[in-house]
Image: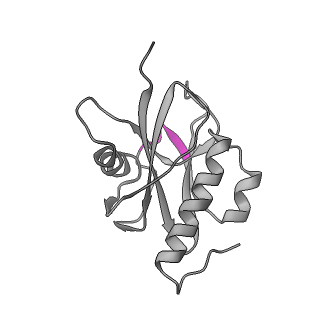
Amino acid sequence: MVAPILIAVAALVRDGRVLLAHRHPRRQAYPDAWGLVGGHVEPGELPHRTVVRECLEEIGVQVHDARPVPMRVEDSALRMHGFLVTRWDGEPVNAAPEEHDDLRWFRPGDLADVRMAHPESVSSILEALRIAADGNPSRRIAE
């Protein structure tokens, strides 16, 4: 049996919106689809460190206090580790144009109309948005 590929992704949440990256159409895996920022867990690397590294490499931000959240995917070849990120230094930019051709903030209601790399992950992303909103009662989820 082949071991699953370990992936760690970050749900960056700000003002009730989540940041998604559009995978470049020339990508081999999941081309021309939206997903959370993240990538492969390197040998000897812990998933939360992967999220810190990938966010710096892909969107140029230094994340703080990444909190684990369940991340559902139906691909048995993958083991997805999700993290909620509500604090970071810097403004997200597309620092990896060979991987992504767009970054965009989405409201929960927008996610139903988005072509996702892992459509089954939308429920996990919505849960991360709820957790973020519960952590700061003054912020409401923007529908």
Q: In which quarter of the image is the N terminus?
A: top left
Estimate the x, y position of residue 33 in percent, counting from the top left: 64, 40
Quick check: is 98 in the magenta stretch? yes
Estimate the x, y position of residue 64 in percent, counting from the top left: 31, 64
Residue bounds of the magenta highlight:
96-101
Q: Can you see residue 83?
A: yes
**Residue 128 in the figure: left or right of residue 120:** left
Residue drawn where x is 50% and y is 70% of the image: 132
Dominant SS in magenta? loop
Asked if 15 appears above or below 54 in the picture, the reply is below
Q: Quadrant of the C terminus?
A: bottom right
Residue at the far front in the pictured view: 1
Q: Quadrant of residue 34?
A: top right
Q: Which of 136 and 104 is in front in this view?
A: 136
Quick check: is 88 in the magenta stretch? no
Estimate the x, y position of residue 59 in percent, counting from the top left: 41, 52
Residue drawn where x is 56% and y is 53% of the image: 20
Asked if 69 appears above or below 117 in the picture, the reply is below
